[in-house]
Image (spheres, rainbow, N blue to C red):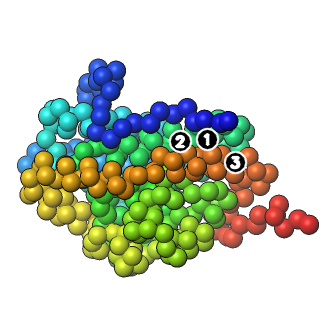
Amino acid sequence: MWVLRTPIRCLFRIPVSERSELRRLQKANFSAAESLIGWEVDDETKIGTITLQAQATYNALTVEMGQEFGALCHQIRLDVTTGGQEVHAIVLQGQGDKAFSAGGNFEWLRSLRNNSVHHNADLMLQFYHSFLCVRSIPVPIIAALQGPAIGAGAGLALACDLRTAAPKRKILGFNFTKLGIHAGMGGSHLLEAALGGPSAIMNEILLTGKVLSGEECLERGLVNRLANDAKESAYALANDIAKQHPLAVRTNLQTLRQSQDNGLEQALQREALAQAICYNREDWGEGIDAVAEKRDPIFEIYHKK
């Protein structure tokens, strides 16, 4: 029997063994010049901003970015829970206006073909956790979707508690089937939670790779507000939250997340194994080539008699 070896973290709990390391991470410099992840807090509003800083690759998610992101999330969690820093809400954004995140880095994904299924499953679960630990931060997280959130980027956007988006643009989509792999980054669970349960539109999004516009996202309840400047709208929403009682916000948030996260870890394990199996296929890479060349993929292995 195969068992994933990546540990499961409990929301809002900081293990004693981690605390000294997290205090060290408090001193880390997440500067715009040196880091893949930016972090700042407005001294007046107490609203934080996390920025995915890889504009040249449309903020594609990498292992290195995940390591920085995870370390920052643990640092913020420690600061907030111990009173080291006052933060009422956080806006998560992509650098620039072209994309929130284009998803997993293609170069890295292509390299996974040479690994065993078990090894890749462990890698993927660790990759998911490094970004989804954003849900362990005990203040509301608002994703500002000024540009598209695709694949794993869409999963990260749905892991946030609230979302704003720009109109008249393609905003949210799971392109995994076009790449030739199973959905990942919690997409199979988080999309269902965001839509309020299983639905025909969920099936269509996951099975066809359909990318929803900002208007379609608002209609389906996948985003909370639509504005030409999604980032400005996200800060306005964060300010609305910051005016409320902090303890009331945090306790309500914990209740909401506990309900929404029921079954999430099991979904992540299924996704990790299913993706790992897909990486070992003979035609793995054709979907990536097709996206890069802006054409439909040809999965020849399934057309052979």
- In the picture shown, does residue 171 fall above or below 49? below
Residue 79, percent from left and from top:
21, 34
Q: Are marks 1 and 2 in contact (CB under 8 Å)?
A: yes
Residue at horizontal 64 percent and vertical 60 percent from the top: 179
Q: Amino acid at mark 2?
A: Leu
Q: Which residue corresponds to mark 2? A: 125
- In the picture shown, does residue 138 fall above or below 71? below
Q: Secondary structure at mark 1?
A: helix
Residue at horizontal 32 percent and vertical 52 percent from the top: 257
Q: Quadrant of residue 9?
A: top left
Residue 121: which disc?
1
Number of numbered labels in the structure image:
3
Q: Which residue corresponds to mark 3? A: 277
Residue 93, percent from left and from top:
33, 55
Q: Which of these two is toward me, 171 or 54?
A: 171
Residue 276, percent from left and from top:
65, 46
Residue 33: which disc?
none
